[in-house]
Amino acid sequence: MIQEYIQKALSKAHYEIIEDEEPFYGEIDVLKGVWASGKTLEECRNNLIEVLEGWIILRLKHNLKIPIIDDIKIDEPKEIPIS
């Protein structure tokens, strides 16, 4: 479920070249705050995946809603066991 969500979210990403030390910039507009940059497009995409994974974990940890993307949703667990 999470991998499918990540793939759907990445399909919504858009990339551009900016004037920066890391000129490739990518973001997922439908997920506020999910953006990354990199020296290459591949690095930018990999960084974007890491940011997205962290974003999902934080949303789950703080019981925040995760937007549905193309009918794919991540259900918030009732309780997150901490060991």
Image: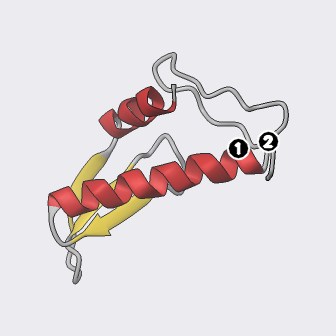
Circle 2/circle 1 CB separation < 8 Å? yes
Image location of residue 48, percent across then percent down: 37, 55
Query: Is 75 displayed left or right of 27 in the figure?
Result: right
| Circle 2: residue type | Ile
Q: Along the horizontal axis of the image, is 66 left or right of 24?
A: right
Amino acid type of the residue tagged 1 in the rendering:
Leu
Q: Position of residue 79 (x, y in %)?
A: 84, 36
Q: Residue at x 22, y 63 (%)?
A: 43
Which of 33/63 is in front? 63
Among the two numbered marks 2 and 1 on one chain, the one whose residue lies closer to the N terminus: 1
* Helix, strand or loop for disc 2: loop
**Against 6, is 46 above or below?**
below
Q: Residue 60 carries which label?
A: 1
Tell me what residue is drawn at x 64 percent, y 36 percent: 66
Residue drawn 27% across and 54% down? 45
Is 47 left, or right, of 68 in this rendering? left
Q: Residue furthest top?
A: 71
In the rendered image, which residue does mark 2 sit on? 80
Alpha carbon distance from label 2 to label 1: 9 Å
